[in-house]
Each structure stands twice: as C-alpha cells, then as structure tokens.
Amino acid sequence: MNPTLRTHDINRSRWRLLAPALATLALLPGRASASLLSGEALDTAANVIAWIALLIVPVVLITVFWLVHILPEKIAEKRRHPQLSAIKTLCLLSLVFGGLLWPLAWLWAYTKPVLHKMAYGTDVDDHAHHGEALSPLHDAGMDRHAASQPAPTVTADEPPAESRQAEVDELKRRIRSLEMALAMATDPRRGGPPGPGERGE
C-alpha cells in the first residue's frame, strides 16, 4: 500500500470525527452580548439616538414632504404653464386635505392647456410675474392702488378742526332742508305727485 494514500485516509477519517464535534461546539450557547456598548456608554448612545429621533427626523421628514408636495408647482413653473396660480392653489389645498389633491396637481402640471391655446393662441404663460408667490392683494391690484394714492398728510394751510366741524354742520343743515323740500314736493295734500302707495286705483 502506498504510504501517501494511507496518510490521506487517516486525515480524512480525523476530519470526519472532528466535523461533528466542531458543529456541536458552534451550536452551544456562548456568552450573549446584545450591544457593542455597555454601561454608561450604552445609556449615552441611547440618549443621542432618542434626541435624533425626536428633533432631527421630524424636521427632515417635514422638509422632504414639503419638497415633494411643491413638485407640481415647480414643474408647472418650469413648463411656463398658464394656470400656474391654480396649480399652486391646488398644492396648498392638498396640504389641508392630507395630500389627496396632490396627484391632480401633478397631472395638471403636465397637461397641455388646449383650451388656453384655443383662446389665446399659445399654451405657455408670457406674463412678467410668472413664478411669483401667491399674493391676493397683488392679484387684486391693491398694491398699485395704494401706490397711486398719496399718503394723507397734514399741511399748514388746512383749516383747524373747529372750522371743519362748522363745514360739516352746514352740510347737515343743507341736507335737512333738501329732504324737507323733497317731502313737500311729493306730499299729495300739498298738491304734489302721489306717493307710491297713494294712487286711487
């Protein structure tokens, strides 16, 4: 018999006996360790993780939610959609309604405004204020109205408050006299035209 084959058979038989023993040792429970840290270091790490979870994660989640929520608005702005204001409003309403309107805003931002093109000959917005934030006072023209009206100023040539009160009293007296003249002109007992319910029909 060849000595190398015999050595090889001995080594193989040793491994056959040793393999179940190693498997049994691997399956035996050892000292359990749930964390790499222990004691005070574990408490400190738990505190840091708790503060991160309480402070940083909500801020990041709200920011990501907001950025995703204004995507339709940004898309409509980039595409120069003529109904950008309505898409912005729908995005804001979607925040109130828990995101239910957001898919509609997304679809609207990608649609071609066919009726706008038929009416105005273009499907893009050519206004100079495109992309500005929603501002109802600006849209209503209140800022232009306020700019065109000069601020009330008190000048030296204005009459004092007593003379203004005298003017108001004079105007009130004239209004009373005009009301009495109108009442006398429409009084049927004085020969004026009959009132609305006084016709003898």
Image (cartoon, rainbow, N blue to C red):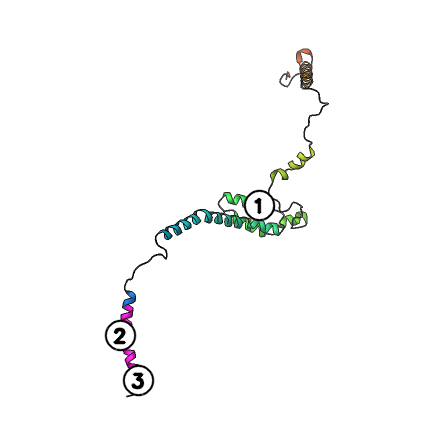
Q: Which mark is residue 88?
A: 1
Task: Point out the image quarter for the C terminus.
Answer: top right
Secondary structure under badge 1? helix
Q: Which residue is mark 3?
A: 5
Q: Is residue 38 above or below residue 188?
A: below
Please state which amino acid type lies under the numbered disc 1: Lys
In the rendered view, does 143 fall on the left or right side of 70? right
Please state the horizontal and vertical placement of residue 44, each as a whole percent of the image.
39, 50
Q: Residue at x 29, y 82 (%)?
A: 7
Secondary structure under badge 2? helix
Q: Residue at x 29, y 81 (%)?
A: 9
Secondary structure under badge 3? helix
Cα–Cα span, label 2 and label 3? 19 Å
Residue 31 versus residue 119: which sits nearer the camera? 31
Please state the horizontal and vertical placement of residue 118, each as a whole percent of the image.
66, 49
Return the disc, 3 or 1, that comes first in the chain's sequence.
3
Label 1 neighbour load within 10 Å: few <14, some 14-19, many 20+: many
Q: Nearest to the eye among marks 3 and 1: give it.
A: 3
Q: Which residues are magenta?
A: 1-23
Return the disc, 1 or 2, that comes first in the chain's sequence.
2
Please state the horizontal and vertical placement of residue 92, each as a whole percent of the image.
54, 44
Please state which amino acid type lies under the numbered disc 2: Leu
**Outermost residue toward the top?**
190
Is there CB contact under 8 Å for labels 2 and 3?
no
State the image quarter where residue 137 is shown.
top right
Label 2 neighbour load within 10 Å: few <14, some 14-19, many 20+: few
Q: Is residue 163 above or below residue 4?
A: above
Task: Tell me if residue 193 can be seen.
Answer: no
Cα–Cα span, label 1 and label 2? 76 Å
Magenta stretch holds residue 17 = yes
Q: Which residue is mark 2?
A: 17
